[in-house]
Image (tube, coloured by chain):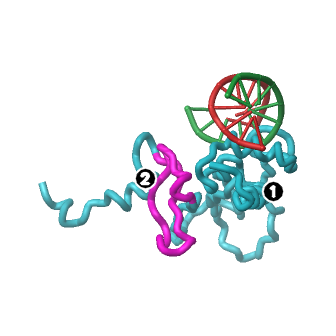
Chain colours: A cyan, B green, C red
Amino acid sequence: MNWTDERVEKLKKLWSEGLSASQIAAQLGGVSRNAVIGKVHRLALPGRAKAGGTPTATRAKRPAAAPRPANFAPRVVTRTVARPAGATVVKEEVAFEYDDAPLARIDTNVVLPMSRRLELTELTERTCKWPNGDPLTDDFHFCGNESPDNSPYCLYHQRLAYQPSAERRRMR
DNA sequence: CCCTGATTCGC
DNA sequence: GCGAATCAGG
């Protein structure tokens, strides 16, 4: 593959948007991440602050304890959020703490896993290949979350993919 | 082991 | 100029 003006422009754009070299390589196609890095240097584009992995992953700071309404139901709600940091999805626990024990938990909190929204070319041996969206539109992507061993799907999508029907379950 | 960018150097 | 190999690191 050869660095056409078009491809160079795309490289500049994606690099400035903070995508990692491997991600850019996947989107350009036909080049390795090394090629991308090499080109970035040759173009004298600004490197990433510091070296190595996620540039000083800035931890989201927990918001100061919110003032509690006097009659607010005491409970703890924890959710795991995922955000892209380079090609890695950083999962962090964000806890919203209110007073005491969750005596009566309200199970309204169904968690759908956020996907890494990978392109086809970005899938690897251990990324979930569950497709999301309409393949005919550009919002189409693959889940991309970690899949165990050689499974094509992450734990969540395994259940969807392999969920036996009620009928089948009755069989023997 | 997964990943990141940086550098070197033969091509 | 290019990028694989290598290095250094999270």
Task: Name the dominant secondary structure of the magenta segment.
Answer: loop
In the rendered picture of this protein, how many numbered marks are placed on residues?
2
Residue A160: name its quadrant.
Answer: bottom left
| Magenta run includes residue A111 | no
| Segment tinted magenta in the rendering | A118-147
Q: Do labels 1 and 2 share a chain?
A: yes
| Relative side of A170 to A14, left or right | left
| Relative side of A158 to A166, left or right | right
The residue carrying mark 2 is A153
Locate residue A25, reporting x and y percent.
65, 50
| Magenta run includes residue A140 | yes
Residue farthest toward the left in the current orientation of the protein: A172
In terms of depth relative to the viewer, which is nearer, A113 or A166? A113
The residue carrying mark 1 is A61
The residue depicted at 82 percent of the width and 70 percent of the height is: A67
Locate residue A101, reporting x and y percent.
62, 59
Q: Is residue A12 visible?
A: yes
Judge the density around disc 1: few (<14), some (14-19), many (≥20) Cα neighbours within 10 Å. few
Label of residue A134 in the image:
none
| Label 1: element kind | loop
Q: Which of marks 1 and 2 is in front?
A: 2
> In the rendered view of the protein, which quadrant contains the C terminus of chain A?
bottom left
